[in-house]
Image (tube, rainbow, N blue to C red):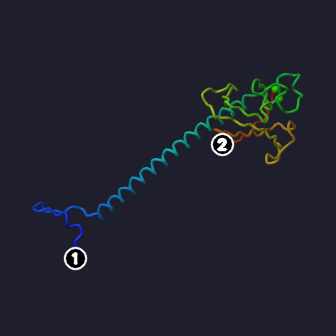
Amino acid sequence: MKTRPCTRFRRRGWGRRGFCLAEVLVASAIVGIGVTAIMTAMETGTKVNAAGKELTQAVFLTQEIREWTLLLPFRDPDPGDAGNPPGSDGSDPQVFVDDLDDLLGVTYGPPRDGTGTAIGGMDGWSQQIDLEWKNPDDLTTTATPGASDVIRVNVSILHNGRTVLSSGWLVARRILQ
Ligand SMILES: [Ca+2]
Ligand SMILES: [Ca+2]
């Protein structure tokens, strides 16, 4: 005996038929695929937004350090420390910085603004600073620390221990410094 799927729900007088199981399953699968695609797109969008926000914060924190390094004198203003080797001159760089090379190998967390002041409300963020002296006649070569008037400042911005952005720029001693 031959069965006729999808006709068993035919209703007398209504002029239409119901759905068979196969049709319902196919429709459910299509809806399921659509919903999954939408959820995946939403999740991806959320991740992209979070990454974009994180990168924006990292750029901001890099700019703050850049501003600070451009404000700091190249040489220590204290005559007693002027001849010191590069470094923090015996002071804790978390507390006191008065010349550029005081920032050698220093990490700030909480991060610092363009005047060296700690920025509140940025838990988990830190700024890693390193300095590299460059030969002014050939900026691709590294000079002995303290023996050049050009320093490349390298900064990495970390969020929860993960590097979000690494950047660098050159600072040259101004003539009057
Ligand atoms: Ca100093
Ligand atoms: Ca110093």
* Residue at disc 2, secondary structure: strand
Neighbor class of circle 2 (other Cα within 10 Å; few <14, some 14-19, many 20+) is few
* Residue at disc 1, secondary structure: loop
Query: Which three-letter amino acid code belongs to the residue tagged 1?
Result: Lys
- Which corner quadrant of the image does residue 55 belong to? top right
Residue with the mark numbered 1 = 2
Furthest residue toward bottom = 1
Residue 11 % position (x, y) = 14, 62
Quarter of the image for the N terminus: give it.
bottom left
For image coordinates 24% across by 62% down, the residue present is 19
Residue with the mark numbered 2 = 162
Furthest residue toward left = 13
Queried on whether the Cβ of the residue with tag 2 lies below 8 angstroms from ligand 2, the answer reads no
**Camera-side residue of 139 and 168:** 168
For image coordinates 79% across by 48% down, the residue present is 140
Neighbor class of circle 1 (other Cα within 10 Å; few <14, some 14-19, many 20+) is few
